[in-house]
């Protein structure tokens, strides 16, 4: 892995731990962090030895959204410059959302603005019970545009709308209730709970997980006449694959599959 200015990256066997590392400004992102996250996602996609990514923040916050100093510079950008900058921001969320392997958000503290977007693009999100969330953009005359699609996939429109239109803060319990996060746990238990999830992921076939993510991404938008053949073809290929054969054999022989031996 490359060395980054705004990220701390640590690979332990098949697990990649990524920590947003700008604690002095609550891990807010700027153009440098955006580019580094995109670069990291590209590296992850090329590395077959990584099977799960855990993303967290350093310090008391998960991510405060956009860095105010970066936003101050953008204030004087032209429309063309703003458009270019917005495309890069969208590319960051897209890169995280379309990782081929599971992305687990370990939400150690509060997430505001675009930080909520990082939560929304994760596959599994576990938060500290003390964490707060807010789509605060409307309060400064902006909108959470680049993350809106991911939010609407995560949260039903009727439950999202009050927070989308007011910027009101959402506590961890409410965030779980509306579907933004999957669980809220005491701070002391956060590492343990996330580690249990990671260990469960590592019990699963690496190729099967990639195909599972592909199913979740593609099937909802498919016409009914397409997803039948598509899904039948996928399961047939997996059954006859090396991984599928190993998994079935391990199950029948009551032993661990080979991919479970390396964690």
Image: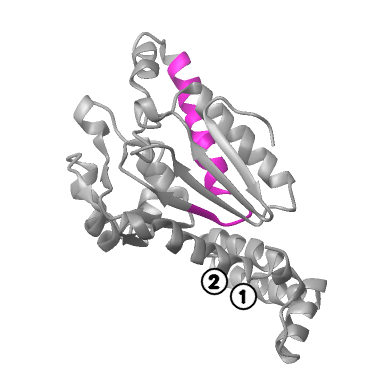
Q: Position of residue 122 (x, y in %)?
A: 47, 52
Q: Is residue 240 above or below residue 190?
A: below
Residue under numbered circle 2: 224
Horizontal side, residue 235 vs residue 104: left or right: right
Q: How is the image coloured?
A: one colour
The answer to whether residue 99 of the structure is visible from this angle is no
Q: Which mark is residue 205?
A: none
Residue under numbered circle 1: 228
Q: Residue at x 39, y 11 (%)?
A: 73
Q: Residues within 10 Å of mark 1 (few under 14, many from 20)?
A: few
**For this rendering, which residue is in front, 198 or 216?**
198
Which secondary structure dominates the residues rendered in magenta? Answer: helix
Q: Residue at x 56, y 24 (%)?
A: 5
Q: Residue 170 colored magenta?
A: no
Q: Is residue 74 above or below residue 253?
A: above
Q: Secondary structure at mark 1?
A: helix
**For this rendering, which residue is in front, 171 or 146?**
171
Horizontal side, residue 225 vs residue 86: left or right: right
Q: Is residue 83 above or below residue 235?
A: above
Q: Residue at x 69, y 71 (%)?
A: 260
Q: Which residues are magenta?
A: 81-104
Q: Position of residue 252 (x, y in %)?
A: 73, 91
């Amino acid at each position: 892995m490359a060395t980054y200015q705004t990220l701390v990256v640590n690979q332990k066997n098949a697990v990649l731990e990524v920590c947003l590392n700008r604690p002095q400004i609550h891990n807010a992102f700027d153009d440098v962090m955006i580019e580094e996250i995109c670069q990291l996602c590209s590296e992850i996609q090329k590395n077959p030895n990584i099977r799960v990514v855990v993303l967290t923040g350093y310090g008391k916050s998960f991510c405060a959204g956009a860095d105010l100093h970066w936003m101050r510079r953008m204030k004087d950008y032209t429309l063309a410059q703003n458009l270019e900058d917005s495309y890069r921001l969208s590319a960051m969320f897209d890169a995280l959302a379309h990782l081929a392997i599971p992305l687990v958000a370990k939400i150690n503290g509060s997430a505001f603005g675009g930080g909520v977007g990082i939560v929304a693009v994760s596959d599994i999100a576990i938060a500290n019970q003390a964490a707060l969330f807010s789509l605060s953009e409307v309060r400064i005359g902006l909108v959470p545009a680049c993350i809106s699609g991911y939010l609407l996939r995560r949260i039903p429109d009727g439950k999202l709308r009050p927070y989308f239109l007011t910027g009101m803060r959402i506590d961890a319990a409410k965030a779980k209730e509306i579907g933004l996060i999957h669980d809220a746990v005491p701070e002391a238990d956060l590492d343990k709970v996330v580690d249990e999830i990671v260990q469960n992921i590592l019990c699963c076939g690496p190729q099967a997980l990639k195909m599972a993510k592909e199913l979740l991404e593609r099937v909802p938008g498919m016409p009914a006449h397409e997803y039948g053949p598509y899904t039948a073809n996928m399961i047939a290929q997996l059954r006859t694959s090396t991984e599928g054969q190993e998994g079935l054999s391990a199950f029948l022989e009551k032993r661990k599959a080979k991919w479970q031996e390396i964690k």
